[in-house]
Amino acid sequence: MTAPVLEVADVRKRYGPTVALDGVSLSIGGGELFGLLGPNGAGKTTLISILTGLTDADGGTVRLFGEPFGRGRRDLRRLVGIGTQDLSIYPDLTARENLRFFGKLYGVRGDDLAGRIEEVLSAVGLSDRGDDRAGTFSGGMKRRLNLAAAVVHRPKLVFLDEPTTGVDPQSRNHIYQQVRALNAAGVTVVYTSHYLEEVEQLCRRIAILDGGRVRACDTLPDLLKTLDASLRVAVAGAPPGFAARLAAVDGVKSVAPADNGFKLVVEDLPPVLAKVAALCAAAGVELAAVSTREPTLERVFLHLTGRGLRD
Amino acid sequence: MPTLTLALKDLRLLLRDPRSAVVLLLMPVVLILVLGLALGEGFGEKPDDRLRVSVVVRDAGLPAKAGRTFPPKPWSEVVVDDLTADPGTAGGAGIRVEVIDSEEAARDLVARGKRAAVLVFGPDFSDRMDRSSFLAAPGFEPVNPFGRDGVVLDRVGLSVLRDPTQPTASAIIEQVAQVSLFRVLIPYMIGQAFARVGDDRFMEQLAEMLQDRKPIPPDVLRELDPVVQKLLAALTADPNFAAIALDEFRKAKGSDFLKATGDAATIARRTPEFRAAVGRAFQDPKLLAAMGKDLAFGEVLTPAVRAEVGPAVRKRVGDLFPSYDFTAPTWAQLTRNQGREGADRNRAVYAEPGTKRYQVLVPQYTVLSAFFLVLSVGWLFTAERRHGTLVRLRAAPLARWQVLVGKLLPCLLVSLAQGFLLMLAGRLLFGISWGPRPWLLVPVVACTSAAAVGLAMLVAAVAKTETQVAVYGTLLVLVLGGVSGSLMPRELMPESMKRASLVTPHAWALDAYSQLLGSPDPQLAVVTTACLMLLAFGAGFLAIAWWRLDLE
């Protein structure tokens, strides 16, 4: 990980008796595309509110670009963009007027702003609708404009909170492209989504938040490694002691009898599968059927939180 | 700069919001029109049995004069004040003066038979009234305003436009003008003349005139004998007189010291005889004739005597007429009566029939609709929440005050535009008059806007949803409007309610508009106080809004 642009240490936040964040710590490096996952009520929105300066934490520290960050740091807010979960654009302004307004709000002016507006409109595929009022746009177009408004001032760190909620596939692809392009341009992106596959596709590192705590934070492969794969083999003519021979195969963690065969828990499925096939052939055991189950982010999430992302 | 950006954005949104245009502009205009039609031409006109005197004032004002203390205003105003003064204990319906703004309009009214007569104070009215005098003096060209039938109006620069088909009515109006002119001119001219009695110039002229009066006849000199005797008695009784006599005798050329001393002693001893001899001389006609031969009356009036005698003469003459004060410039003071002041309620600006109702309705609904700004501003704030853009504003590098000011500025601009447009609509669509001091409408509109924006920001700070804004905002505006007299003329409200209504900014605004649009002589103090109160309301509302505003 490169030098962190965002460091969160033991951040706490309560709303009355409800604990929203209970000692969250994170570190996000410059240029990362970081995924933030969590079920409803996990504390994601509260965390993003604190990280974007919308609210202050009750405790802990947030450092942005190496400096302490809070609601009063307007200088640091200029470096941050926010794509809110709910749309935050003016329906009675045109797309260009929306972008001009948000750009000026962050101090971008003149030709620079005009050029930047055309650039982001093109990036989100709205160049030909730039002079139409945002209120006339489809849901997907509004989402794209919302994203454009978050980045028109060239932020160094962008928070995208559920940016593809309720959008059509075409708009979703535009958003993916734009997120990747942003990240490729060196912008650090913190991405939250209900769609695990989005996070899997886009993000290199992922944090799973639940109950106001970070349950896991790692790269996707390392997260997947926290769960074992399983291999179910149906065999015919297995000699006595065959289960023990299977258990002795390198990479097999456990063997249990199952219908017409065995269920194996393994660390890494492909090499174990080859070795099991070889062992069956050598022992004259007929391998009637094989089924596998590999770890997924969803399984990891379920394992860590005990509930689905959309629960 | 972000504040301006925010303000321009909100201004654009306000201008694009058709609800704002309807509420702020269309609704008041429609209400004024509908109510005006429904209430009829008579609305705003009070039943009035006072004699109406219509005037056109073209008076150019008082000529410059050093040390002037009277009159304090142009003579046309003095005459109008006299006309509009309440009749006093004598009772009577009184007179109301109607000021028509142009001679052309007056001619038109007379030609159409709408007015029997109109008095026109010409441009030189004050100049001619100022020069009206009984006196003549070198370098001064007096105007003699009086003729066989009273004041000759032409001579004082007053003309009368008459409708020949209404001779009786126009004659009454002219007679009323005659009486007022008498009441104004007579004390002024008498005062001027009386001030001359016994003054330096008068006494000097008198002395000059009496220089030609000689000789002084023996009878006149004989009458001086008692005075001379008094002088001699006092003179000879004084020891210094003997010393002066001795000194003079001794100094005389070639005098003998002893003889001079003896002569002086003789005079000192024989003073009774000397006084008796003088007394006899003053009884001798031949001698008196000789004494008075080269003596003029004017020689007696030396400057010192004139300085003593002049004021005494003036006072004594004044004392001869104890019921009058000839030095007073006004009729009331001349006749030693209580003064009569011109009353504003007896004076009005001419308005086309039917425009009176709009003269009342336009300011009423301008003020009422100014406060309907709470809806537009409230909607603007709640829309910011509804569209989620408030989150983006909070995340932007903006301070709280920048958000508030950014919202406040466009609202103030819209409110100002609304106020001026409604005043313009009042003029163009409903024919109202902007009164004699139209420029004062600018601060009144501006201060009303300041109060309205303050209240709007307060409502926007408190209300969370558009429904709350619509329900509570409308209720608030209508209740305040009802209490203040924006829904019905304040004039119809009882005095106690009028006083109570001053807890609303509307009432202050209406009072200011009433002065400017309803009075021919708006009181600057009333307008200023109203403006200050409106600003105070605005500041108070804003302070509470700042305290209550929750951007989260």
Image (spheres, rainbow, N blue to C red):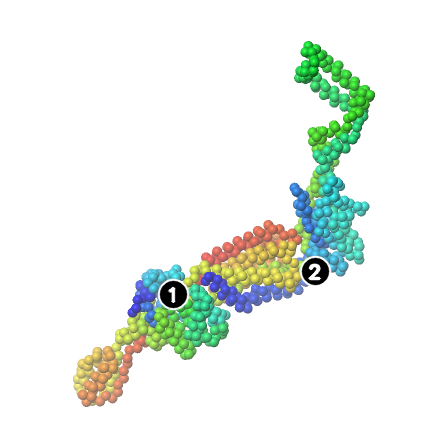
Protein chain holding label 2: B
Which element is circle 2 on? loop
Task: Give the number of the disc on residue B209.
Answer: none
Q: Is residue B55 left or right of residue A197?
A: right
x and y, in percent, of residue A284 in the image: 19, 89
Q: In the rendered image, which residue does mark 2 sit on?
A: B353
B392 left or right of A215 in image:
right
Residue B531 or B34: which is nearer the viewer?
A: B531
Residue ID at (79%, 19%)? B281
Q: Is disc 1 placed on a helix, strand or loop?
A: loop
Point out residue B241 in the picture as x, y percentages from the top left corner.
68, 17
Compute the Cα span from label 1 to label 2: 67 Å
Q: Quadrant of the C terminus of chain B?
A: bottom left
Of A256 and A149, the residue lying toward us: A149
Residue B286 found in image quarter: top right
Image mark for residue A79: 1
Q: In the figure, is residue B353 to the left or right of A308?
A: right
Marks 1/2 in contact by CB < 8 Å: the verdict is no
Query: Looking at the picture, does residue B450 appear above or below residue B192?
Result: below
* Crowd around label 1: few <14 · some 14–19 · many ≥20 (10 Å): many
